[in-house]
Image: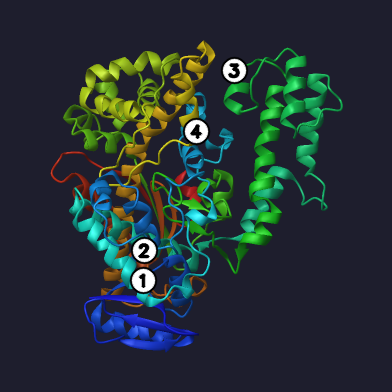
Amino acid sequence: MRIAVGAMGPGRVGLVDPSVSSGPLETVALHELAGVVQAFESSHHPRWVWADTRRWYPRLLAAGVRVDRCHDLVLAAAILDHSTTTVAARAHGGRPRAEWLPAGPSEAGQAEQAALVVPAASAAHSALFDLDDFEIATDAPMPEQAVGPRDVLGVPVDAVLAEHARQLALVAASERPGALRLLLAAESAGALIGAELHAAGLPWHREVHERVLETELGPRPAPGRKPARMEQLAAEVRAMLGAPTVNVDSQVDLLKALRGAGIQVESTSRWELGEHDHPAIEPLVAYKKLARLFSANGWSWLDEWIVDGRFRPEYVPGGTATGRWATSGGGALQLPKNVRHAVVADPGWSLVVADAAQLEPRVLAGLAHDEAMAAAGRGRDFYSGIVGAGVVQTRDQAKVAILGAMYGATSGESGRLVPRLARAYPRAMALVDRAAAEGERGAGVTTLLGRSSPPPGAEWRAAQSLASQPEATAADERRARSRARDWGRFTRNFVVQGTAAEWALCWMAGLRSKLVTIASTAAQPSVAASRSGSAFERMPHLVYYLHDEIIVHTPTELAEQVAGAVTDAATGAGRLLFGDFPVEFPLDLAIVESYASVDA
């Protein structure tokens, strides 16, 4: 059963079964909605159809009401209206796209933002292995108009029904209706999970966090001042560089001072600074690390984001072009290791932390049906398997080679090692090479389930057009080739990163259902997690997600059962996406009281 939810007159909400033409099932005031939804959820277990989960579901969760399934029209439209699998269906006409829907990722101005999802090759090592040094916000969400309309409660239920019918027709007429149905269900489940993560919150011990800050930075400084330890390090940097007035927080000033001291660098990222032997490097790297802690997770962050023992960031499911999530505040996708000491389970509860090991290379093996590549990760560390197969000599070389393959490296050690991968795993390398070639010519590429890349933007098209003119200069042609290669690197990684995001959605959706089953069959926990809210205080629940890592907050007596469910859900996600193809998705899994114990 499906029930559409939307406005039906001033202050009224209509609930309509799309298969019944005799009128609404219910028409209620907004404050009555939670009780009515709870009743239908218990009696009919429907799939709720609404404009935007981020606008409807938090209201229900605040009243202690969870729903099992939904169809998020905003997220579904962003996929369907730009997927290569629905091109023919859209060309044949039918219902027009609803005017109230936000701009999708292929609209003007979105393509350049989408490119930030994948780092440039020059920063690839930093992006993958050392996130603290990556100075581009790879998880920045699309602009607000690409996330959802601001007045979703005002979308009439008739408009919701019409858009739902349009989307079902597109799926049915698509090239891969089964895959799209799975993707839309997973994307909508992700929307529910995102709202639940915010509602329940990540357990956070403020006193522990404050001790970390005092240990690292010193006492809390007065407003407008820097911590004592940062001031000390800044003074050491100035002395070592012979630049007593340099502003170490200014990129321009600092680069000038570094070069004046004979340190020829193009940026101040740690990976580049580490290539130089100079007494200023060590205190400068230490300063940058503390500056990041102070600005991103210092006392001001604590005051703003930690309320009643919980960290509740605003997750944005589907917030980037590849389908990976973003956040609109709080920096949940970049929690440094030192502040993880503050993530502590409630008394009587535990954290089940799981990280999918080498997710993207395994996804690439499954996408390409490259049996040799899948065998490298069967029953063992993926990179060690590449070494064992004789492709490269060390595990570090294997990591660099895989990175180069997925990000299109052509120089340095990555460029030297990638041809070895091509010989060992020709199917996998052919897949990403084809994706890159499609991007270079401006075409779109598509994930396993049907999410497609946005087209390059106006500047890209202008550069290609100019280079094709009779009067084009050699510089015009070089610029066009460079932009084409850059976009090819984006599409090369898009198919892998996007399909990995689909695996993660299926993993979490499967786990979410299993947690409900565990809660329904287990005895009530001896201690409630009251700060998680009435919807979650008596059951294990997801509290954190980062691309390939999750945390479940669970009554300690259920922790082993939950850990088994996490593993089973990962296996199930692999089967959903890749069927019987023998690619494995092992987890690094731990049951702990503190998130920091995982790294100990």
Is 97 left or right of 376, judged from the image as shown?
right
The earlier-in-sequence mark between 4 and 2 is: 2
Q: How far apart are marks 1 and 3 (CA)?
A: 57 Å
* Residue at the disc numbered 4: 127
Question: Residue 20, labelled with which disc?
Answer: none
Q: Is mark 1 on a helix, strand or loop?
A: helix
Q: Disc 3 designates what residue?
A: 275
- Marked residue nearer the N-terminal end (1 or 3): 1
Question: Where's residue 537, x and y in %?
Answer: 44, 74
Look at label 3 and name its amino acid: Glu
Q: On the image, numbered disc 2 is attached to which residue?
A: 73
Residue 160: assigned label: 1
Circle 1: residue type: Val
Q: Viewer-nearest of labels 4 and 1? A: 1
Looking at marks 2 and 3 on the same chain, the residue that comes earlier in the sequence is marked by 2
| 2 and 1 marks in contact (CB < 8 Å) | yes
